[in-house]
Amino acid sequence: MKILLLTVTAGYGHHATAKALADLFEQRGAETKIVDVYEYISKVVRTAISQGYLLSSKYTPEIYRLFYTRTSKNRKKLNKMNIVKIVNTLGAFKFEHFVDNFEPDAIVCTHVLAAHLVSEMKNRHMVDAPCIGVVTDYCIHPYWEDVVNMEALVTASELITHTAVKRGISEERILPLGIPIHPKFNRYLSKEDACAQLGLDPERRTVLVMGGSMGYGNSRKLVRQITKLGLGCQILAVCGNNKRAYNRLKAFAQEYDGDCTIQVMGFVDNVEVLMSAADCIITKPGGLTVSEAIAKGVPMVLVNPIPGQEERNVEFLLNNGMASLVTKTFPLDDALYHLFHNPVRLRTVRESIRAIGHPDASEQLVNYVIGLVKQRESGALPQQDGADSLPDTLNTAT
Protein backbone atom coordinates (compact mmCIF):
# COMPACT_ATOMS: atom_id res chain seq x y z
CA MET A 1 0.00 0.00 0.00
CA LYS A 2 1.32 3.44 -0.98
CA ILE A 3 0.21 6.62 0.79
CA LEU A 4 1.08 10.06 -0.58
CA LEU A 5 1.03 12.90 1.95
CA LEU A 6 0.93 16.37 0.44
CA THR A 7 1.65 19.60 2.28
CA VAL A 8 2.82 23.18 1.77
CA THR A 9 5.53 24.95 3.74
CA ALA A 10 3.68 27.72 5.57
CA GLY A 11 4.57 27.31 9.21
CA TYR A 12 5.66 24.07 10.87
CA GLY A 13 2.40 22.36 11.80
CA HIS A 14 1.29 21.12 8.37
CA HIS A 15 4.51 19.19 7.78
CA ALA A 16 4.54 17.85 11.35
CA THR A 17 1.02 16.50 10.86
CA ALA A 18 2.09 14.80 7.64
CA LYS A 19 5.14 13.30 9.39
CA ALA A 20 3.06 11.97 12.29
CA LEU A 21 0.68 10.26 9.85
CA ALA A 22 3.54 8.91 7.73
CA ASP A 23 5.14 7.28 10.78
CA LEU A 24 1.88 5.54 11.65
CA PHE A 25 1.23 4.40 8.09
CA GLU A 26 4.73 2.94 7.92
CA GLN A 27 4.17 1.09 11.19
CA ARG A 28 1.19 -0.51 9.47
CA GLY A 29 3.37 -1.63 6.57
CA ALA A 30 2.58 1.12 4.08
CA GLU A 31 5.08 2.93 1.88
CA THR A 32 4.78 6.69 2.30
CA LYS A 33 6.09 9.85 0.71
CA ILE A 34 5.74 13.40 2.01
CA VAL A 35 5.84 16.09 -0.66
CA ASP A 36 5.63 19.88 -0.55
CA VAL A 37 3.59 20.28 -3.71
CA TYR A 38 5.03 23.68 -4.59
CA GLU A 39 8.58 22.46 -4.03
CA TYR A 40 7.86 20.07 -6.87
CA ILE A 41 5.83 22.42 -9.07
CA SER A 42 7.74 25.68 -8.61
CA LYS A 43 10.37 26.58 -6.02
CA VAL A 44 9.67 30.24 -6.73
CA VAL A 45 6.03 29.78 -5.73
CA ARG A 46 7.08 27.72 -2.70
CA THR A 47 9.41 30.48 -1.50
CA ALA A 48 6.79 33.14 -2.14
CA ILE A 49 4.21 31.24 -0.09
CA SER A 50 6.46 30.29 2.84
CA GLN A 51 8.20 33.67 3.10
CA GLY A 52 5.02 35.58 2.34
CA TYR A 53 3.21 33.78 5.15
CA LEU A 54 6.05 34.40 7.62
CA LEU A 55 6.63 38.03 6.73
CA SER A 56 2.99 39.08 6.46
CA SER A 57 1.80 37.27 9.59
CA LYS A 58 4.79 38.40 11.67
CA TYR A 59 5.57 41.91 10.46
CA THR A 60 2.31 43.09 8.87
CA PRO A 61 -0.40 41.21 10.77
CA GLU A 62 -3.11 43.72 9.90
CA ILE A 63 -2.52 43.13 6.19
CA TYR A 64 -2.68 39.37 6.77
CA ARG A 65 -5.91 39.83 8.75
CA LEU A 66 -7.39 41.91 5.92
CA PHE A 67 -6.48 39.22 3.37
CA TYR A 68 -7.98 36.47 5.52
CA THR A 69 -11.18 38.47 6.10
CA ARG A 70 -11.57 39.35 2.42
CA THR A 71 -11.16 35.75 1.31
CA SER A 72 -13.78 34.76 3.86
CA LYS A 73 -16.35 37.39 2.88
CA ASN A 74 -15.76 37.48 -0.88
CA ARG A 75 -14.69 33.90 -1.51
CA LYS A 76 -16.84 33.30 -4.60
CA LYS A 77 -15.76 36.52 -6.27
CA LEU A 78 -12.07 36.00 -5.53
CA ASN A 79 -12.13 32.34 -6.52
CA LYS A 80 -12.87 33.03 -10.18
CA MET A 81 -9.36 34.23 -11.03
CA ASN A 82 -7.27 34.04 -7.85
CA ILE A 83 -3.58 33.18 -8.00
CA VAL A 84 -4.07 29.83 -6.23
CA LYS A 85 -6.48 28.62 -8.91
CA ILE A 86 -4.15 29.78 -11.70
CA VAL A 87 -1.04 28.14 -10.18
CA ASN A 88 -2.87 24.89 -9.42
CA THR A 89 -4.38 24.69 -12.90
CA LEU A 90 -0.92 25.01 -14.44
CA GLY A 91 0.77 22.87 -11.78
CA ALA A 92 -1.72 20.02 -12.07
CA PHE A 93 -0.25 18.88 -15.38
CA LYS A 94 3.29 18.89 -13.99
CA PHE A 95 2.36 17.14 -10.76
CA GLU A 96 0.40 14.49 -12.64
CA HIS A 97 3.69 12.88 -13.73
CA PHE A 98 4.81 12.56 -10.12
CA VAL A 99 1.51 10.99 -9.04
CA ASP A 100 1.55 8.57 -11.98
CA ASN A 101 5.09 7.45 -11.11
CA PHE A 102 4.38 6.93 -7.41
CA GLU A 103 0.95 5.31 -7.98
CA PRO A 104 -0.53 6.08 -4.53
CA ASP A 105 -3.40 4.05 -3.14
CA ALA A 106 -4.56 7.12 -1.22
CA ILE A 107 -3.63 10.79 -0.93
CA VAL A 108 -3.77 12.81 2.29
CA CYS A 109 -3.48 16.62 2.13
CA THR A 110 -2.46 18.46 5.31
CA HIS A 111 -2.64 21.95 3.78
CA VAL A 112 -5.56 23.57 2.00
CA LEU A 113 -3.46 24.64 -1.00
CA ALA A 114 -2.29 21.07 -1.53
CA ALA A 115 -5.92 19.97 -1.29
CA HIS A 116 -6.87 22.56 -3.91
CA LEU A 117 -4.28 21.12 -6.28
CA VAL A 118 -5.52 17.56 -5.81
CA SER A 119 -9.14 18.65 -6.13
CA GLU A 120 -8.28 20.32 -9.45
CA MET A 121 -6.49 17.15 -10.60
CA LYS A 122 -9.47 14.98 -9.68
CA ASN A 123 -11.75 17.37 -11.52
CA ARG A 124 -9.60 16.79 -14.62
CA HIS A 125 -9.54 12.99 -14.06
CA MET A 126 -5.79 13.04 -13.40
CA VAL A 127 -6.13 11.28 -10.03
CA ASP A 128 -8.16 8.18 -9.25
CA ALA A 129 -6.96 7.39 -5.71
CA PRO A 130 -9.17 8.40 -2.77
CA CYS A 131 -8.18 11.77 -1.31
CA ILE A 132 -8.59 13.09 2.22
CA GLY A 133 -8.13 16.69 3.35
CA VAL A 134 -6.93 17.46 6.89
CA VAL A 135 -7.82 20.79 8.51
CA THR A 136 -5.10 21.66 11.03
CA ASP A 137 -6.91 24.48 12.85
CA TYR A 138 -10.02 24.75 15.02
CA CYS A 139 -11.89 26.56 12.27
CA ILE A 140 -12.57 26.20 8.55
CA HIS A 141 -10.32 28.35 6.37
CA PRO A 142 -12.39 29.90 3.54
CA TYR A 143 -10.36 28.05 0.90
CA TRP A 144 -11.53 24.67 2.24
CA GLU A 145 -15.03 25.50 1.04
CA ASP A 146 -13.89 25.10 -2.56
CA VAL A 147 -12.17 21.73 -2.08
CA VAL A 148 -15.00 19.63 -3.46
CA ASN A 149 -13.33 16.52 -4.89
CA MET A 150 -12.34 14.83 -1.63
CA GLU A 151 -13.64 11.61 -0.12
CA ALA A 152 -13.43 13.17 3.35
CA LEU A 153 -12.51 16.34 5.17
CA VAL A 154 -10.99 15.75 8.61
CA THR A 155 -11.80 18.49 11.13
CA ALA A 156 -10.59 19.27 14.64
CA SER A 157 -13.86 18.68 16.47
CA GLU A 158 -17.50 17.69 16.15
CA LEU A 159 -18.28 21.24 17.26
CA ILE A 160 -16.95 22.59 13.96
CA THR A 161 -19.36 20.52 11.85
CA HIS A 162 -22.18 23.06 12.16
CA THR A 163 -19.95 25.86 10.84
CA ALA A 164 -18.64 23.71 8.01
CA VAL A 165 -22.14 22.79 6.87
CA LYS A 166 -23.21 26.45 6.98
CA ARG A 167 -20.36 27.19 4.59
CA GLY A 168 -21.57 24.66 2.07
CA ILE A 169 -19.47 21.62 2.95
CA SER A 170 -21.48 18.41 2.77
CA GLU A 171 -21.94 16.90 6.23
CA GLU A 172 -21.52 13.43 4.73
CA ARG A 173 -17.90 14.27 3.87
CA ILE A 174 -16.97 15.70 7.28
CA LEU A 175 -14.86 13.45 9.48
CA PRO A 176 -14.46 15.10 12.93
CA LEU A 177 -11.57 12.98 14.15
CA GLY A 178 -9.43 15.79 15.55
CA ILE A 179 -6.13 17.23 14.35
CA PRO A 180 -3.64 14.37 13.80
CA ILE A 181 -0.65 14.55 16.14
CA HIS A 182 2.18 12.17 16.96
CA PRO A 183 0.95 9.09 18.88
CA LYS A 184 3.46 9.75 21.67
CA PHE A 185 1.17 12.54 22.91
CA ASN A 186 -1.51 9.91 23.52
CA ARG A 187 0.67 7.91 25.92
CA TYR A 188 0.11 8.57 29.61
CA LEU A 189 3.10 9.88 31.54
CA SER A 190 2.59 11.07 35.10
CA LYS A 191 3.86 14.45 36.23
CA GLU A 192 6.15 12.67 38.69
CA ASP A 193 7.75 10.49 36.02
CA ALA A 194 8.07 13.40 33.60
CA CYS A 195 9.72 15.56 36.26
CA ALA A 196 12.10 12.71 37.09
CA GLN A 197 13.19 12.54 33.43
CA LEU A 198 13.75 16.31 33.35
CA GLY A 199 15.40 16.69 36.74
CA LEU A 200 12.50 18.76 38.11
CA ASP A 201 10.75 18.87 41.48
CA PRO A 202 7.24 17.41 41.06
CA GLU A 203 6.03 19.35 44.11
CA ARG A 204 6.69 22.72 42.49
CA ARG A 205 4.57 24.36 39.79
CA THR A 206 6.02 24.01 36.32
CA VAL A 207 5.26 26.49 33.54
CA LEU A 208 6.13 25.60 29.95
CA VAL A 209 6.77 28.49 27.55
CA MET A 210 6.68 27.49 23.88
CA GLY A 211 8.20 30.28 21.82
CA GLY A 212 8.20 28.41 18.52
CA SER A 213 10.82 28.47 15.79
CA MET A 214 9.41 31.26 13.61
CA GLY A 215 10.32 34.15 15.87
CA TYR A 216 6.87 35.34 16.91
CA GLY A 217 6.45 37.19 20.19
CA ASN A 218 9.01 37.81 22.91
CA SER A 219 9.81 34.74 24.98
CA ARG A 220 12.25 36.62 27.21
CA LYS A 221 9.55 39.13 28.13
CA LEU A 222 7.15 36.31 29.00
CA VAL A 223 9.71 34.52 31.16
CA ARG A 224 10.63 37.75 32.92
CA GLN A 225 6.97 38.37 33.74
CA ILE A 226 6.61 34.88 35.20
CA THR A 227 9.63 35.39 37.47
CA LYS A 228 7.98 38.48 38.98
CA LEU A 229 4.82 36.68 40.11
CA GLY A 230 6.27 35.16 43.27
CA LEU A 231 5.23 31.64 42.25
CA GLY A 232 8.65 30.12 42.82
CA CYS A 233 7.95 27.94 39.82
CA GLN A 234 10.05 25.93 37.41
CA ILE A 235 10.10 27.53 33.96
CA LEU A 236 10.79 25.47 30.84
CA ALA A 237 11.40 27.79 27.88
CA VAL A 238 11.53 26.20 24.41
CA CYS A 239 12.84 28.39 21.59
CA GLY A 240 12.87 25.89 18.72
CA ASN A 241 15.29 26.93 15.99
CA ASN A 242 15.13 30.60 16.96
CA LYS A 243 18.77 31.18 17.94
CA ARG A 244 18.25 34.85 18.74
CA ALA A 245 15.48 34.07 21.23
CA TYR A 246 17.57 31.24 22.68
CA ASN A 247 20.63 33.43 23.24
CA ARG A 248 18.60 36.24 24.81
CA LEU A 249 16.79 33.86 27.14
CA LYS A 250 19.98 32.05 28.05
CA ALA A 251 21.62 35.34 29.01
CA PHE A 252 18.61 36.31 31.12
CA ALA A 253 18.56 32.92 32.87
CA GLN A 254 22.25 33.21 33.74
CA GLU A 255 21.74 36.67 35.26
CA TYR A 256 18.53 35.80 37.11
CA ASP A 257 18.87 35.00 40.83
CA GLY A 258 15.25 34.84 42.03
CA ASP A 259 13.06 32.06 43.41
CA CYS A 260 12.24 30.49 40.03
CA THR A 261 14.39 28.04 38.11
CA ILE A 262 14.74 28.50 34.36
CA GLN A 263 15.68 25.88 31.79
CA VAL A 264 16.23 27.27 28.29
CA MET A 265 16.05 24.85 25.37
CA GLY A 266 16.37 25.15 21.62
CA PHE A 267 14.84 22.51 19.37
CA VAL A 268 13.58 19.53 21.38
CA ASP A 269 12.10 16.17 20.47
CA ASN A 270 10.48 15.45 23.84
CA VAL A 271 7.69 18.02 23.93
CA GLU A 272 5.31 15.34 25.18
CA VAL A 273 7.50 14.90 28.29
CA LEU A 274 7.70 18.65 28.86
CA MET A 275 3.91 18.91 28.62
CA SER A 276 3.44 16.00 31.02
CA ALA A 277 5.57 17.84 33.57
CA ALA A 278 3.83 21.19 33.07
CA ASP A 279 0.96 22.61 35.10
CA CYS A 280 0.23 25.03 32.26
CA ILE A 281 1.63 26.00 28.89
CA ILE A 282 2.09 29.51 27.52
CA THR A 283 1.98 29.32 23.75
CA LYS A 284 0.78 30.75 20.49
CA PRO A 285 -2.52 29.14 19.45
CA GLY A 286 -1.25 27.16 16.47
CA GLY A 287 -3.49 24.20 15.69
CA LEU A 288 -0.85 21.51 16.19
CA THR A 289 0.61 22.80 19.47
CA VAL A 290 -2.89 23.34 20.84
CA SER A 291 -3.87 19.77 19.91
CA GLU A 292 -0.75 18.38 21.58
CA ALA A 293 -1.51 20.33 24.75
CA ILE A 294 -5.12 19.13 24.69
CA ALA A 295 -3.95 15.53 24.27
CA LYS A 296 -1.74 15.91 27.36
CA GLY A 297 -4.49 17.68 29.31
CA VAL A 298 -2.47 20.85 29.92
CA PRO A 299 -4.30 24.15 30.56
CA MET A 300 -3.26 26.82 28.07
CA VAL A 301 -2.47 30.51 28.34
CA LEU A 302 -2.48 31.86 24.79
CA VAL A 303 -0.33 34.72 23.51
CA ASN A 304 0.30 36.53 20.21
CA PRO A 305 -2.27 34.85 17.93
CA ILE A 306 -1.66 35.34 14.22
CA PRO A 307 -4.60 37.16 12.61
CA GLY A 308 -6.95 34.84 10.81
CA GLN A 309 -6.89 31.16 11.67
CA GLU A 310 -5.10 31.49 15.02
CA GLU A 311 -7.62 34.10 16.14
CA ARG A 312 -10.33 31.59 15.21
CA ASN A 313 -8.50 28.95 17.24
CA VAL A 314 -8.58 31.32 20.21
CA GLU A 315 -12.33 31.80 19.83
CA PHE A 316 -12.89 28.05 19.83
CA LEU A 317 -10.68 27.43 22.87
CA LEU A 318 -12.06 30.32 24.92
CA ASN A 319 -15.68 29.53 24.08
CA ASN A 320 -15.14 25.95 25.20
CA GLY A 321 -13.36 26.84 28.44
CA MET A 322 -9.99 25.32 27.58
CA ALA A 323 -7.68 28.35 27.70
CA SER A 324 -7.07 31.96 28.69
CA LEU A 325 -5.91 34.72 26.34
CA VAL A 326 -3.32 37.31 27.32
CA THR A 327 -4.29 40.82 26.19
CA LYS A 328 -3.32 44.38 27.07
CA THR A 329 -6.13 44.50 29.61
CA PHE A 330 -5.65 40.91 30.83
CA PRO A 331 -1.87 40.48 31.13
CA LEU A 332 0.06 37.30 31.79
CA ASP A 333 0.22 37.76 35.55
CA ASP A 334 -3.58 37.97 35.75
CA ALA A 335 -3.98 34.89 33.54
CA LEU A 336 -1.65 32.79 35.70
CA TYR A 337 -3.11 34.11 38.95
CA HIS A 338 -6.65 33.19 37.83
CA LEU A 339 -5.46 29.73 36.84
CA PHE A 340 -3.33 28.83 39.86
CA HIS A 341 -5.37 30.53 42.61
CA ASN A 342 -8.76 29.15 41.58
CA PRO A 343 -8.84 25.36 42.00
CA VAL A 344 -12.38 25.18 40.60
CA ARG A 345 -11.34 26.94 37.39
CA LEU A 346 -8.27 24.74 37.00
CA ARG A 347 -10.38 21.62 37.42
CA THR A 348 -13.02 22.92 35.01
CA VAL A 349 -10.42 23.71 32.34
CA ARG A 350 -8.99 20.21 32.58
CA GLU A 351 -12.45 18.65 32.37
CA SER A 352 -13.24 20.69 29.25
CA ILE A 353 -9.99 19.59 27.66
CA ARG A 354 -10.72 15.92 28.34
CA ALA A 355 -14.27 16.25 26.98
CA ILE A 356 -13.30 17.85 23.67
CA GLY A 357 -9.86 16.41 22.95
CA HIS A 358 -9.08 13.79 20.31
CA PRO A 359 -5.67 12.40 21.33
CA ASP A 360 -6.12 9.36 19.05
CA ALA A 361 -6.87 11.38 15.90
CA SER A 362 -3.86 10.05 13.99
CA GLU A 363 -4.69 6.42 14.70
CA GLN A 364 -8.33 6.98 13.75
CA LEU A 365 -7.40 8.63 10.46
CA VAL A 366 -4.88 5.93 9.55
CA ASN A 367 -7.55 3.30 10.27
CA TYR A 368 -9.99 5.14 8.06
CA VAL A 369 -7.59 5.48 5.12
CA ILE A 370 -6.41 1.87 5.27
CA GLY A 371 -9.99 0.67 5.49
CA LEU A 372 -10.96 2.87 2.55
CA VAL A 373 -8.15 1.46 0.41
CA LYS A 374 -9.04 -2.12 1.32
CA GLN A 375 -12.69 -1.57 0.45
CA ARG A 376 -11.71 -0.25 -2.97
CA GLU A 377 -9.35 -3.16 -3.55
CA SER A 378 -12.13 -5.61 -2.70
CA GLY A 379 -14.51 -3.87 -5.07
CA ALA A 380 -16.81 -2.71 -2.27
CA LEU A 381 -16.31 0.89 -3.40
CA PRO A 382 -16.28 2.16 -6.98
CA GLN A 383 -13.13 3.79 -8.31
CA GLN A 384 -14.33 7.32 -8.84
CA ASP A 385 -13.12 10.89 -8.70
CA GLY A 386 -15.02 11.97 -5.62
CA ALA A 387 -17.41 10.81 -2.96
CA ASP A 388 -20.85 11.86 -1.85
CA SER A 389 -20.71 9.98 1.43
CA LEU A 390 -18.20 8.37 3.75
CA PRO A 391 -17.74 4.61 3.88
CA ASP A 392 -17.78 3.11 7.34
CA THR A 393 -14.12 2.21 7.73
CA LEU A 394 -13.24 3.65 11.14
CA ASN A 395 -11.89 1.15 13.66
CA THR A 396 -12.22 -1.66 11.13
CA ALA A 397 -8.81 -1.67 9.46
CA THR A 398 -6.32 -4.24 10.65
Image (tube, rainbow, N blue to C red):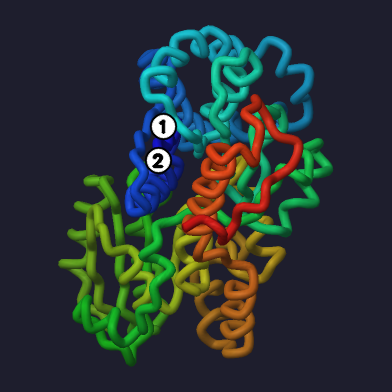
Q: Are marks 1 and 2 in contact (CB under 8 Å)?
A: yes
**Between 171 and 39, which is closer to the camera in this rendering?**
171
Q: Position of residue 106 (x, y in %)?
A: 50, 35
From mark 1 to mark 2, how far is it between C-alphas? 7 Å
Q: Dot 2: what SS?
A: helix
Identity of the residue drawn at 28% across and 84% down: 193
Closer to us: 271 or 67: 271
Amino acid type, residue under disc 2 in the picture: His
Identify the secondary structure beneath mark 1: loop
Q: Is residue 390 left or right of residue 99?
A: right
Quarter-of-image position of residue 46: top left
Q: In front: 294, or 40?
A: 40
Quadrant location of residue 10?
A: top left
Residue bearing mark 2: 15
Identify the disc placed on residue 184: none
Q: Quadrant of the N terminus?
A: top left
In the image, 330: left or right of 46? right
Q: Position of residue 78 (x, y in %)?
A: 72, 18
Residue kind at label 1, given as amino acid type:
Thr
Q: Residue furthest right?
A: 166
Q: Looking at the image, is mark 1 or mark 2 nearer the viewer?
A: 2
Q: Is residue 75 left or right of residue 365?
A: right
Q: Which residue is mark 1?
A: 9
The percent coordinates of residue 169 (x first, y second) are 77, 38
Counting from the top left corner in percent of width and height, residue 4 is at 42, 33
Q: Which class describes the residues within 10 Å of circle 2: few (<14), some (14-19), or many (20+)?
A: many
**Res. 13 visible in picture:** yes
